[in-house]
Amino acid sequence: KNEVEQSPQNLTAQEGEFITINCSYSVGISALHWLQQHPGGGIVSLFMLSSGKKKHGRLIATINIQEKHSSLHITASHPRDSAVYICAVRGSNYQLIWGAGTKLIIKP
Amino acid sequence: KAGVTQTPRYLIKTRGQQVTLSCSPISGHRSVSWYQQTPGQGLQFLFEYFSETQRNKGNFPGRFSGRQFSNSRSEMNVSTLELGDSALYLCASNAASGTTLYNEQFFGPGTRLTVL
């Protein structure tokens, strides 16, 4: 079993829909990252959080430390949100452990 | 503030050759991490350097090595290239200090290496 599991692996939705991507982890962590990777390779860090909830524009990230679970939400989704969303957790040895990513396609 | 830069952006090598990739972190960042991304394996951690010292290392063979200079720039070297080394190599920097270890990572555009 992978230490970081993301679901779903693939998600296709219509423009305007509310999107939720989930991340569950099995190791003790000090922080959890959500990142976005567009075709072509560029990776952008969206959030780093260790508790509670963070919001940037239409993006919201939550984490439940007790349940070892985090969610990334996108409100009013747009085709430009189409990308791979990656969850990564940082364990006690500094190393980031990566989820496999969720490929999101938003259709106009 | 300039972002993380990586050179070269694209590279084609043949089996058996060696390659050196370079990463310049954001000014003031002392931590640099390297990752390999392949379609089949996703993102795999190679190593992390902090203040010229390798702080952590992933599960890669000894053909993969790195170093960090006093100006925090980092290089990654792969010797005796194999076809399976074809990948996107990403570098990330963060503002970790000796006591503040867990900070947001900023990624470079990557170097796409093709081994023929």
Image (spheres, rainbow, N blue to C red):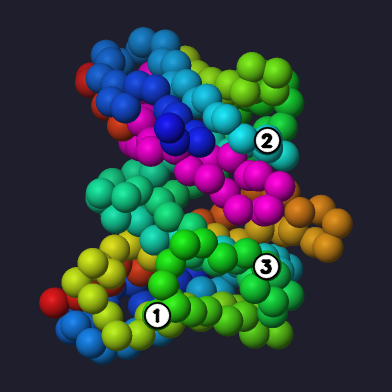
Few, some or many residues within 10 Å of mark 2 (<14, 14–19, 20+): few
Work out whether residue B3 can be spotted.
no
Hey, what amino acid is under mark 1? Arg
Residue A98 inside the magenta-drawn segment: yes
Residue A3 point in image, percent of width and height: 51, 36
Residue B36 point in image, percent of width and height: 39, 61
Secondary structure of the residue carrying numbered label 2: loop
Q: What is the CA distance from the residue labelled 2 to the residue labelled 1?
A: 31 Å
Identify the residue under disc 3: B55
Hey, what amino acid is under mark 3? Arg
Q: Name the quadrant containing residue A18.
A: top left
Which residue: 68% across, 53% down?
A93
Looking at this view, name the residue that lies furthest to the front. A1
* Relative height, residue A54 to residue B7 (above, below): above
Residue A34 point in image, percent of width and height: 53, 36
Identify the residue under disc 2: A28
Q: Chain of mark 2?
A: A
- The quadrant of the rendering that contains the C terminus of chain B is bottom left
Residue A12 inside the magenta-drawn segment: no
Q: Chain of mark 3?
A: B
Identify the residue under disc 1: B63
Magenta segment, which residues?
A76-102
Hey, what amino acid is under mark 2? Gly
Which residue: 49% across, 34% down?
A4
Secondary structure of the residue carrying numbered label 3: strand
